[in-house]
Amino acid sequence: MNSSLSKNTSSRIQSYKHRDKDSDELRRRRNQYTISLRKTKRDEQIQFKRNLIANDSMSDETDDDNDEQRRCLNLNEILLKCQNSDLSICYQGIRSARKILSIERNPPIDELINLNLLPILVQCLSYDQYPDLQFEAAWALTNIASGNSQQTQAVVNANALPYLLRLLHSTYSNVSEQAVWAIGNLIGDGSRLRDYAIELGVIQPLIEFIQKDIPITFLRNVTWVIVNLCRHKDPPLSLNVVQEILPALKYLLSFTDVTILVDCTWALAYLLDCGNTMIQLVVESGMISDIIRLLNHNEIKIVTAALRAVGNVVTGTDEQTQYVLNHGVLNYFSKLLKHQKNKLNKEAVWFLSNITAGNQQQVQAVINTQLIPDVIHHLQHSDIQIQKEAAWCISNLTMSGSVEQIQYVVDQHVIPPLCNLLQQHDAQLLQVCLDALHNILKQISEENLEHVTKEIEECGGLDKIENLQTYSNNDIYQQSYEIIEKYFSHENDDDDISAMSQVPHNDMFSFGNNSTNQTVPDNNYKQNNLRFQF
């Protein structure tokens, strides 16, 4: 048996069984699994670093001129210009460096770092009398910091961050905006650089930008930097810092600009993924109802972010989950479950799986909004990833729900799709489906038990459960064995008794009887009826 598979499956299943666990713990552990899954499989929703590519709106040169620059300018020649004490010549070198760092593919970041360009760029940030030079230097640093972690760290090691923070107060908006962009790339590298920037005082200038009347493009960049502040959760932002930025996020939620709404909502989604205390801070800020309304937005990116945000809320306590339900969130889910985008379907079913992990009042709320038939539809017809989420949703309901609620899902024909998934090879999915079936069998009323066992047998489920008794994973073997032994073994016993009673009288031996009617068995008797050997 594959011991590692057994261990992983065991730990995963233990996190979901109702054995000595309340719904709060079930939700929290469910969330841990989901997050680890997303870390390995999902695409990043928002880029955590961004390279600034030159275009006509930012440069007065044609594409042909840029191509010529890329072909002809030698890095050493660029460096010599950058080192010139004549700032006009230095400006030419810095600008050339910025251009070559702005090419879309394989910019020579390491080459320029190795030529010791970074200290020169940082020094140029201090030339207040030459804002164009500051702008070009900040742009070059932005693109170097958009590289890998080593390249980003090289910018920090050159002591660029304090100078960039100083430029946030520049009277030239293009300079301060470029500094914002560079800082966003540094913060996006991880929680260590994020905390360093916070220590140096990055929060207050960002909040002040939001309060000012700045161009929408500038505000988009500021919002993106706030996303990067909220993104990392190892460790998450301190509660004090979160309390500082929540009013700014609440203000940004009032905008209609799609880019700002997407980034702002993702910032909240990231914060809501940092535990119950953080969830409570956001709940108390009064933004949950605003996020819920975004579920009905016509822009899919906004809906996706809002769905993740409210989904993270319901990984919290029963009270936090109920708060979301009280704001009518389930009214949006019929549309989400029928959406043409599979990703939204999956997120919607995941959300509901955390509701059905709650108390019976919350389970009933899902039933009352007629969402269970849609979940069962996904369980039967959708791709395997959505089927997994649907299986968790049903399994949780069978653990949390009342007898009447479990009977309801049975009446919605949940048995065949659950049984159909028993032919999959995913150990976790198999265990979830077996859990659901076992819970149904244990909880269903006595008068309806025979109907359930008959349905399992008629849809081929019994054969699949029997086959799982040879599965390499011990938990799956044990679960399937228990189901067969408790709910189906009596049928085999009845068959044996029935077979015995139907043996023809003239095939039986009679002892102590002189009747001439005694029949001699044929030569194949021992092979055909071993039960009567003597």
Image: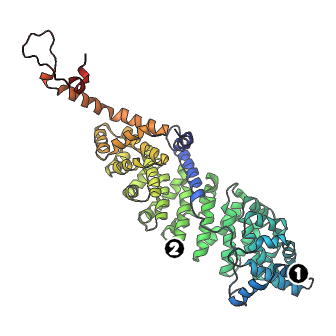
Which SS class for mark 1? helix
Label placed on residue 80: 1
**Cα gap from disc 2 to disc 1, whole angstroms:** 49 Å
For this orientation, the residue located farthest to the left is: 516
Residue drawn at x 87%, y 87% as measured from the top left: 88
For this orientation, the residue located farthest to the front is: 523
Q: Mark 2 or 1 closer to N-term?
A: 1
Seen in the picture, residue 467 relative to 275 is either above or below; the reply is above
| Residue type marked 1 | Leu
Say which of 530 and 201 sits in front: 530
Residue drawn at x 54%, y 70% as measured from the top left: 301
Label placed on residue 185: none
- Quadrant where the C terminus is found in the figure: top left
Residue 362 seen in the figure: no
- Whole-percent x and y of residue 458? 28, 45
Tag count: 2
| Residue type marked 2 | Glu
Label placed on residue 299: 2
Residue drawn at x 50%, y 67% as measured from the top left: 295
Left or right side of 427 for 169: right
- Whole-percent x and y of residue 398? 42, 45
Left or right side of 187 for 354: left
Which numbered mark, 2 or 1, is in the foreground of this view?
1
Say which of 136 and 149 sits in front: 149
For this orientation, the residue located farthest to the right is: 85
